């Protein structure tokens, strides 16, 4: 746990460079800690610290090539696309917008580490729920690091269609490099809070760890738009953080870390997703599964066949 926190904190500090970077002294102190812990904890820690050192070396190389001109690249490109929201530029440039950050975080083991070893488990939960040979149109709202989308693409029926939207061109470009060219897939540069699709266009939609990265007003619009574009009888699957159980130590330990790295995630640690679901669209809760001591959730909603008010959490 300590090593994982250090990776995230160090990566954030290093990517911030001149603003609040670790500097040479901080970096040296971190390596001294690794050396000490390796001697004290033995082989298991030395094995893990090798992964940590690899990550830190990558961050160090990125730091030398980073500057604010590069960081603004995707924002400049966005002039011909939907505007990149200020909250995204201010809080997540280090994770999604900067070209070198995309290269750094597109590592399966790192994505799994960020989710405390639960990435594959959560992906499997989604894919097992969807099954194989998905007919009709499937919408993934926002790209995701790791192999979720390529695996989802393999589940699409020959006459089906997978469509992915993201507001960042660099994320769509990164995703296109992971997808097979012979499958029915479309990528759209589009704001999740203002989807340019007609009502009832899709049979199912997926939100995979997007909501915790959005401020409340954007989160509410994203959920409303997702439900709007799903046909009656279709489903919306949401995978994200959830309020951890009282006996989960991360309930008290992880929130300060999220406050530092992901300022909007606290909402999902303290409130249920039903808080932000629209009251004007009828839906029912199909399932609400919790993982890792309640820290993660997979919520599946079914859009009502007839117009009626849905209540989150109803069975």
Image (cartoon, rainbow, N blue to C red):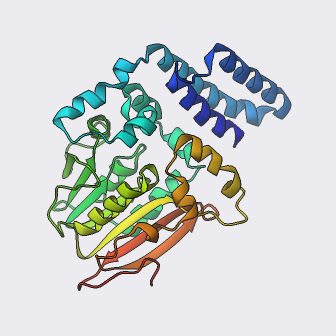
Residue 106 shows in the view: no
Task: Give the percent coordinates (x, y) of residue 67.
Answer: 41, 17
Would you identify the image quadrant in which residue 40 lies?
Answer: top right
131 vs 191: above or below: below
215 vs 200: above or below: above
The residue nearer to you, when weighing 286 against 198, is 198
Residue 76 shows in the view: yes
9 vs 197: above or below: above
The residue nearer to you, when weighing 115 against 211, is 211
Q: Residue at 76% x, 20% y: name it.
A: 32
Residue furthest right in the image? 40
Q: Residue at 62% x, 22% y: name it.
A: 22
Quarter placement of the N terminus: top right
Would you identify the image quadrant in which residue 160 lies?
Answer: bottom left
| Residue 7 shown left or right of residue 77 in the figure | right
Task: Give the percent coordinates (x, y) of residue 16.
Answer: 51, 25
Q: How many marks?
A: 0
Task: Give the percent coordinates (x, y) of residue 110.
Answer: 53, 39
The residue nearer to you, when weighing 245 against 3, is 245
Would you identify the image quadrant in which residue 176 lies?
Answer: top left
């Amino acid at each position: 746990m300590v090593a994982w926190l250090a990776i995230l904190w160090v990566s954030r500090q290093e990517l911030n460079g001149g603003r609040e970077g670790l500097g040479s002294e901080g970096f040296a102190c971190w390596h001294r800690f690794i050396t000490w812990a390796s001697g004290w904890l033995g082989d298991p820690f030395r094995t893990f610290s090798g992964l940590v050192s690899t990550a830190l070396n990558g961050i160090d190389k990125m730091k030398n090539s980073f500057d604010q001109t590069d960081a603004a690249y995707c924002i400049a490109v966005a002039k011909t696309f939907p505007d990149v929201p200020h909250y995204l530029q201010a809080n997540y440039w280090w994770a999604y917008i900067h070209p070198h950050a995309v290269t750094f975080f597109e590592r399966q083991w790192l994505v799994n580490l960020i989710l405390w070893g639960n990435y594959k488990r959560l992906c499997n939960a989604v894919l097992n729920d969807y099954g194989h040979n998905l007919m009709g149109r499937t919408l993934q709202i926002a790209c995701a690091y790791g192999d979720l989308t390529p695996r989802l693409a393999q589940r699409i029926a020959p006459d089906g269609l997978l469509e992915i939207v993201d507001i960042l061109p660099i994320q769509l470009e990164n995703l296109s490099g992971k997808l097979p060219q012979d499958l029915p897939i479309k990528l759209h540069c589009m704001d999740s809070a203002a989807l340019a699709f007609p009502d009832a266009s899709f049979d199912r939609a997926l939100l995979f760890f997007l909501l915790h990265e959005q401020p409340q007003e954007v989160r509410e619009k994203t959920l409303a738009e997702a439900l709007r574009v799903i046909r009656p009888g279709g489903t919306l699957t949401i995978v994200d953080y959830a309020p951890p159980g009282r006996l989960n130590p991360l309930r008290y330990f992880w929130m300060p870390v999220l406050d530092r790295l992901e300022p909007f995630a606290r909402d999902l640690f303290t409130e249920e997703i039903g808080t932000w679901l629209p009251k004007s669209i009828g839906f029912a809760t199909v399932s609400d599964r919790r993982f890792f001591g309640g820290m993660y959730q997979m919520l599946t909603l079914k859009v009502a066949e007839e117009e009626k008010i849905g209540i989150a959490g109803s069975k």
